[in-house]
Amino acid sequence: MTDQTPSGAPGPRGPHASGDPRRETEIERLHRLEAAARPDQRRGDTRRHVDAATVAALDIPTRPDPAAPPTSVAQSGATGSRTSSGPGRARRRARRGWGTRLLGVVGLLGFLLTWELVSRTGVVNPTYLPPASAAIADLFRNFGLAAFWEAVGDTMLQWFLGMVIAVTAATVLGFVIGSSTFLRRFTNSTIEFLRPVPSVALIPLAVLLYGVSIQSALLLIVYASFWQVLIQVLYGVADVDNVAMNTARSYGLGPLARLRYVIFPTTLPYLMTGIRLAAAVALILAITAQLIIGTPGLGAEIAKAQSGGSYVAMYALILATGMLGVLINIVMRVIERRVLSWHSSVRTEVVK
Amino acid sequence: MKTLKSLLYIVGLPVILLVIWYLATAFGEKNFFVPTPALLAETFVETWTWDRMTTDVFPSLVRLFWGILGSIVIGMVGGLLIGSIRWLRALLEPTLEFFRAIPPTVLIPVLMLLIGIGDDMKVAVIIAGAVWPILLNTIEGVRAMDEVLSDTTHTYGIKGFNRVRYLILPSAMPQIMAGIRQSLSIALILMVISEMFAASSGLGFTIVQFQRSFAIPEMWSGIVLLGIIGVLLSFIFQLIERVVLRWYHGLREIENAA
C-alpha cells in the first residue's frame, strides 16, 4: 500500500487490483501468467474461462432486470458488460461496429415494415392493429401536446419518488443488517420469505388504502424495488475483504471511517447494480399501477385510450413507454459508469 | 443445541412480527383494514379450501404453467438460433431490446384486442412478458461461450445436434437459468394482472372482487395466498436449478476456495 492516496482509502485496493472485484482465482492467475508470456498468441482472451463462469454469475450484465438474481454483477465487472476485452477484440469490434449498427437499424425498420404490412393487408384487423405509420405519427403528435408531457411527468415523478424512498430505506437497512452477523442470520428467513411475494398482490390493499392517489403507485414501486436494492447491499457488505477491514482497524479507523472507506467502496458496485435493477422494476410497477389502479400517468392514458376505442393512441402510448424504458436503461448505465469510474472493472475496460 | 439455535434464528423474527401484529390489532379499537392474525388464518382456510381451489386457484396455476413453459421453449429455441447466427443477432438485437424495455403489463390491452379475453389471452400475456429475460439471456449465454471450447469442438468435427447438446447448452445454462428465474416472477405478476383486467375466474379476479366488496379479511387471505405461491415457485425453481446446474455450483465452489 505504498501508493496509498492521502485520503487513505484502504478498501478497494489490495486484493481487488486484479481487474475483478472478487479475489483472483488460481485459474485466472495461471491464464494471466500465460498471457504475459505469449501476448500475441492469446489475444486478450486470457480470462475466458473465468469469464464464462463469472459473467454467468447469474446477473444479466447488460440489462436491468425485473428480478434480482442472487449474485451480483459486481462479480462480472461492475458495469456489467463483458469484462473480457483486449486488443484483438477491440479491433474486431471497431471493424464490425458500423455494420452491426446498420443491421440493427435494418432490423428495427424491418419490424416496423412487417407491422405496417400486416395491418395494411388485413391479415390482422386494422382496427385492432393500426399500421405502424399511424401509431408513430400519433406519437409525434403527442410530443407537441401538454397532456402527454404531463402524463410522462406524472409517471417519472412516481418513479423517482419510489426510487428515492426504496433506495434510501434499502441502503440504510442493508448496511445495518449486513454489518452484524447476528442481524443477518436473524432476518434471513423473513427476507427470503417476503422477497418473492409478487408486489402486484398488494394492488387491492393499495386501492383500499389510497385509492387512485399517487401513494398507491408508490406503495407498489417501493415494495418491488426495495428488495432488489436490499439484497444487493447485503451481498456487497458481506463481500468486504477481511484483510482490508483489519488493516483499517490497525490504522485506527473508527467505525464511521471504516464504513466510509472500507465498507462503502466495496458495496458501491453492488448498490449500483441494485439501483439499476430497481429502476427498471420501478418503471414497470409505476405503469402497472397506473394501468390497473388508475393513478395518473402514461399507464392510465393507455387504459383510457383502450377503453375509449382510440387504438391508434394506445399503440402510440405503448411505444412511448418502451422509449421511456430504453431511456431509463441508458441513463442508469451512464450513471453507473460515472459513479464507478474508479472501480477496477471499469478502469481495465478503458485501459485494455 | 446447534440445530435449536439455527431454528431460533429462522423462526425468531417471524414470531416477533406476528406478535407485534397481534398486539397491534387485537387490542384497542378494531381496525377495519387489518384483521387479526387469528381471523386471517381462519378466513384463509375458509376461503381457499376446495371449492375455490378448483374454480380459481387451479385455473390460474394452469395458465401460469403453460405461460412459463411457453416462454422457456420459445426463449431457448429463439435464443439458441439468434445467439449462434451473428448477422441475425445484429439484425434483431435493438428491436428485442426495445421490446424488453416495454413494461410487460401494457401488452395486456394489446393482446386483449388481438386475441380476445379467453384463457389463451392470459397465456399469451404471460409469454409476451416472460419470454424476454430467457431469450436475451440465452443469446448472451451462447455469445459468451468459451472460444477455446468452441474451436475444439470444431476441430473434432462435432456438429449439429451434438454441438448444441454438449457445448452450447451447458455453457449457456447458468445464464439461461438466471433468465428463467426472472421470468418466473414476471410470469406470476402477469398472471395476476391479466386476471385483474379481464377474467371471470382466477386468483387476480377473486382478490379484486373481494376488495371491491370490502371483504377485507378475504382480500388479505388472497394476498397471503399469492405470497405463498410466489415463495413456493422460487423454492421449486431453486430445487430444479440445483439439479440442472450441479456441475456449475461445484465449479464455483472450487474457484471461490482457490
Image: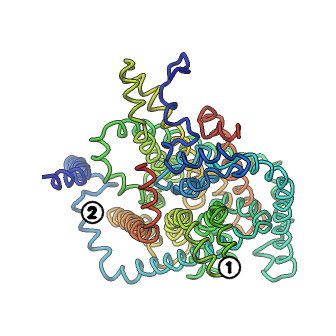
Between A229 and B258, the one nearer to me in the picture = B258
Which residue in the protein does label 2 denote? B40
- Please count the marks in the image: 2
- Is B197 left or right of B153, judged from the image as shown? left
Residue A11 sits above or below residue A272 on the image:
above
- x%, y% of residue B91? 80, 65
The chain identifier of the residue carrying mark 2 reads B
Q: What residue lies at 67% left-to-right and 62% top-to-bottom? A: B143
Residue B121 sits above or below residue B225 on the image:
below
The chain identifier of the residue carrying mark 1 reads B
- x%, y% of residue A352? 71, 41
State the mark number for residue B159.
1
Q: What residue lies at 81% left-to-right and 60% top-to-bottom? A: A104
Among the two numbered marks 1 and 2 on one chain, the one whose residue lies closer to the N terminus: 2
Q: Say which amino acid is labelled 2.
A: Leu
Q: What residue lies at 84% left-to-right and 60% top-to-bottom? A: A105
Between A32 and B177, the one nearer to me in the picture = A32
Q: What residue lies at 41% left-to-right and 67% top-to-bottom? A: B242
Q: Say which amino acid is labelled 1.
A: Lys
Helix, strand or loop at mark 2: helix
Between A86 and A314, the one nearer to me in the picture = A86
